[in-house]
Image (cartoon, coloured by chain):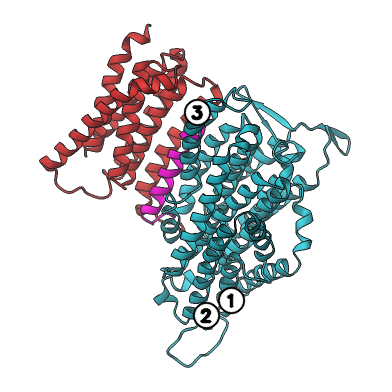
Amino acid sequence: MSAPVLWIAFPAVLGVILLFLRMRVTLVAVLGTLATLSLALSAWFLPDREQFTLGPWTVPFSDTLNLLGRSFTLDPADRSVVALIFLMAALWFGAVPVARTGHNFIPLALGMISLFTAAIAVEPFLYAALLIEIGVLLSIPMLIEPGRRAGRGIMRYLTFQTLGMPFILLTGWMLEGVETSPVEASFVVRLTLLLGLGFGLLLAIFPFYTWLPLLAEEAHPYVASFVFLLLPGAIFVLVLGFLDEYAWLREVPEISTAFRWAGILMIITSGLWSMFQRQLARILAYALILEIGFSFLALNLALSERTALYLGLFFALQVPRGLSLGVWSLALSVLRQEAPELQFHHIQGLGMRFPITAGSLVLANLTLAGLPLLAGFPLRWSLLDGLASSDPGAAGWALVGSLGLLIAGLRTLMVLLASDQVPAWFLSESLWQRSFLLMGAAALLILGLFPQWLLPLLVDLPAAFQQLAP
Amino acid sequence: MNVESLAVPAVILIFLSASTLLGSRDWRICIAALALQYLGITLLVGIHWPIEEAAVKLLAGWMAGAVLGLALISLHGEPEPYESLTISYIMFRALLAVLAGLAAYSIGDSLVEWIPEIAPPQATGSLVLIGLGLLHLGLTTRPLRVTLGLLTVLGGFEILYAALESSILVAGLLATITLGLAMVGAYLMAAPSLEEVEE
């Protein structure tokens, strides 16, 4: 037995088994949730030992698995990240019967998780780009359900993700053997260009993010949000892998500056564009772009000062992001059953018939906008505080972007409550829909009021990058 | 077998097949051109790799073509019909192909300077595929065309990367991506006609 077998091979095999059972939606959701929850808990609590005793048997346990001449290693430092991935998956899978996604969602999502965990484990780390690309290919049948036509969003998603991979592999080749700072300035320019294009395409950095709102509109919101959460997370791990492996790369000022400007551009444009959207899923996509922008700002600060603190903040941002996207997309899934297009003129007044759904949706939107007392606020505040001390202008622009998303949330609320008739409130959601949405909304409030409950659990996450945050 | 002597014919084969992919609307001709394109890719990869390892590219490419071909047979051709073929359409695409070929030929030497590991025909062949593949992607959003464009770009990159990396794992993963792209393309073409089975 080895760690890669447990956290990479097992979910992949389970995904294949669940593919055969996919018509039994509830059974698949229960099995998927229990399995991912168990894997999350085992990643968090399994002690670091070379063997385990199970009754009369002694099972040897290794961190490494060798395959075709390369190794996959998940050492104890990586396990916090692995635990976070599986915990998010468990939360997501639990609400699948309520969200009414396609039958293939959980089996294929398990395959994606397996591949993205392999991307964390593979040595040399730059092969992760290949595994992420295979994960992207696996996500396509999840995003476009049978019976639906492939639109421009899915085609751009496929194109941009596939075109990004070669740049990362070429950059990895360029960096081979460059242990100390390179002398040639032209080398640094070429390298920055390749890295910028590669990660620009993969992470949907401005101006390559046009596929995100289009895809959000075309796909099931719950499935799209899962991909939107998992994919940038995996690619950011690749970014951190580069920074961890090559110390001199961290000292190149252009890289840090590029992170800052990429972040600011994404926050401003997405915040402003979100104000003018008239389709709910598109607002969610712009909120994700804004979140990727804030991740870039956290990385920029981590490269400049107090690396461990801001790297911890970078990982901590994933929690309110995951929760908010989950609640938001679940609410959209409920509304979609009533108004499939999710256009403003279709959802007008629906808030009175679906008050819990409408409230949860707006709460999730406001959380990602960084409103005080909600889960996103404490981390956003720390980030903006750090940014303001080094570049007040950038902090101001980041606030403007957040304000845009806040206005988008308030607009959504107004539309959901606008009605020509006399208001008549009643609950149209099913019991399960109410329960999941209320639990999610409560988590957003509780984490906003008591952030200190969450942060100690995330303190080990930067340990996976030992050179970057010693 | 001396593969290097076949390098220049392989570049010509690649240029002709990628240009055919760009210009032709008949899916049968496109699948045949894709098969020939992968033959050229294999010959250029064979300059650095033993030919039995390079044959993995041929196998993956032909299987990708077979997957797309089978999907199109079952769908009785591409789901959406094309507009009628015009002279301007043919001339425009032929001109684009020639320009991309000339650009690849002139940039090839610079690429060899930057990556000394690759041979000049490999550089030219790789750039021809990347250029024509990108043009293909820029001109369409149809699932078959996007898949063919991506396979073309990826083929160009594989020639380049074969000179730099000979790991079996990488070769296997790239072959998986080639096949996966074909399967995704087949799925996207077939998806509108598929029905979700209810529980």
Q: Which residue is mark 1?
A: A359
Q: Residue drawn at (61%, 64%), measured in percent from left and top?
A: A324
Q: Residue at x 83, y 41 (%)?
A: A47
What residue did someone put label 2 on? A351
* Residue A224 seen in render: no
Residue A205 image position (x, y, % from top left): 48, 49
Name the element at disc 3.
helix
Q: Is residue A190 left or right of residue A229?
A: left
Image quarter of the N terminus of chain A: top right
Question: Residues under labels 1 and 3: Cα distance?
Answer: 52 Å
Q: Position of residue A309 (x, y in %)?
A: 73, 50
- Residue A107 relative to residue A337: left or right: right
The residue that label 3 is drawn on is: A187
Label ID, residue B143: none
| Amino acid on which disc 2 is placed | Gly
Q: In this picture, which residue range is highlighted in magenta?
A: A145-170
- Do callouts 1 and 2 mark residues in contact (Cβ within 8 Å)? yes
Image location of residue B71, percent across then percent down = 34, 41
Instruction: Identify the colour of chain A in the image.
Output: cyan
